[in-house]
Each structure stands twice: as C-alpha cells, then as structure tokens.
Amino acid sequence: MNLHRKLQARAEQQRPVRVGLIGAGKFGTMFLAQVQRTPGIHILGIADLNPERAREACRRAHWPAEQYAAPSFAAARKGGGTHITEDALALIAADGLDVVVEATGVPAAGIRHALAAIGHRRHIIMVCVEADVLAGPLLAERARRAGVVYSLAYGDQPAIICELVDWARACGFPVVCAGKGGYMVWGKILPAATSLARRGLPLGLAHDVKLTRPIARGQIVTWDDVVVNAADPTVAFRREMEKTFTPPAPR
C-alpha cells in the first residue's frame, strides 16, 4: 500500500495524522497550501511568535476563516479545526498531537523544539536545515532512543539529496560528493571529519560572534577564534554532538 492510500485509509477511518506546524513563513505557508489537498492529515495547531502572521499565511493559502478559528487545541481536535498560538511548546504538548513540523529557520529554536517534541514522544519533521546541520545526528539519536522518528522534509532539497545518495549507494555507485547548487556567503566547505578535527565553528553558530583575533581569507574560523557562551543550550548541545560523533584519533 502506497503513501496516498495509507493516508486515504486514515481519512476514511477518521483517525488523521495530527500535525503541529511551528513557523508560518515561506515554507510554512507552502505547506498549508498543500496540506488542504492531502487526505488523512489534520493541522491541529500553528505556532508563530506573531499569530497574525500565521493567520495571514492561512489566508494566503486560501483556507476558509472558520478552519483556523478554533479557540483551543481541545476544540481543534474535537471539531477538526486549527488553533493558532504564539506558544510553540504548548503546541508540542497538545493532547493528541502526532507530528511536529519545525519550520522556524532559527537553529536554536529548531533544536529546542525538537528536544521538546522528543520529550513528548512526537515525531519531528525538521525543515530548519540550519538546526539539522548543527545538531541533526544527535537529535536523530535522541529520537531513536525515545522511539520516535526524526526526519528531514521529503521534497525539500536536503531530503532529496539524501534520497539520491541512498539510491546511488543501493545501485553500487561510490558517492564522491553530494550537494546542491545555489548561493551562500563566501565559505570553505570541508568534510565533516576534517571540520571536527580542526575544531571548525559551525555555520549555525557563526552569526554575530565576536572574534578573538583577525581571520585571514581562506582560513576557517574555529571555536578558539570566537567568544562563545558555554552555558548557551545550543552551544552545549553542539559540543555534546561533537563529543559523541567525533571519531577517535588514530594511534
């Protein structure tokens, strides 16, 4: 049975997958436009720091006003509507929620929401690739231990790249490089093992940092080159991931 038929069966059995969307920006709005046409999915709630932006996203996605007017998560669950809130953690904790779609685009928020979702035994779709790059392997391991799924968003570029890599390897081809075209700030892309060995500062933590010394063009910025707050939960989680997944030095 394929995915569409499984969702159709859920719709017919009146047991939809209940989803909470965090972040009503570009991706969130596109998702809201698509999900109206997908059977077997119920958007239980939408969380955004600006609830009016979430309502505007629903309007742009051509949702009827009554669909996103539920006054509470309980009312949304009972009536099949959607509750809009500014409290992402309340959405994650809402009774009956199955899946969290994290689409804030903010690494620290993405990690915080993913950890909360794991704590509440919710599956996570991580659209915030910045958070996944920063701490994805450790988040996936935490989710596995909790018995839930941590996944990228199918159809989004990172997930499609992963699928292509898996297909190539399944066909017996060695994968030399995987990525996508696009644009970025000037940077130096290194293999993960090399970056970890050289204590490279992750891009997700490189915003508004204070340098301790001048960095020449062509040189990577390391943990030792910046002032960091070791008590910051995002920094602490990244360092835990590096400690967990950095391979031992050869003897």
Image: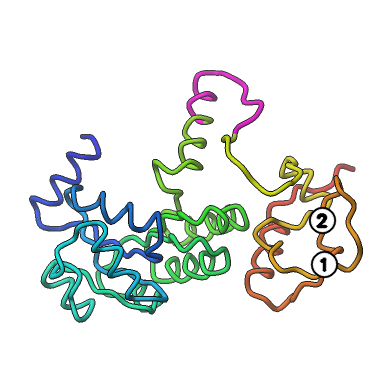
Which of 127/218 is in front? Answer: 218
Quadrant where the N terminus is found in the figure? top left
Q: Residue furthest top?
A: 172
Q: Position of residue 237 (x, y in %)?
A: 64, 67
Q: Earlier in the sequence, mark 2 or mark 1?
A: 2
Task: Please state if 71 lies on the left or on the right of 183 as rendered.
Answer: left
Task: Please state if 44 lies on the left or on the right of 121 as rendered.
Answer: left
Cα distance between the residues tagged 2 and 1:
8 Å
Q: Is residue 11 above or below residue 206?
A: above
Residue drawn 88% across the image and 56% down it: 215
Q: Assess whether residue 172 is covered by the magenta stretch.
A: yes
Q: Position of residue 146 (x, y in %)?
A: 45, 62
The residues colored magenta run 166-178
Q: Position of residue 93 (x, y in %)?
A: 35, 75
Q: Amino acid at mark 1?
A: Val
Q: Residue 243, located in which quarter of the rendered image? A: bottom right
Q: Is residue 94 above or below residue 224?
A: below
Residue placed under numbered mark 1 in the picture: 226
- Is residue 226 visible to us here? yes
In the rendering, which numbered label is found on residue 221? 2
Residue drawn 45% across the image and 66% down it: 118
Q: Residue 71, located in which quarter of the rendered image? A: bottom left
Q: Amino acid at mark 2?
A: Val
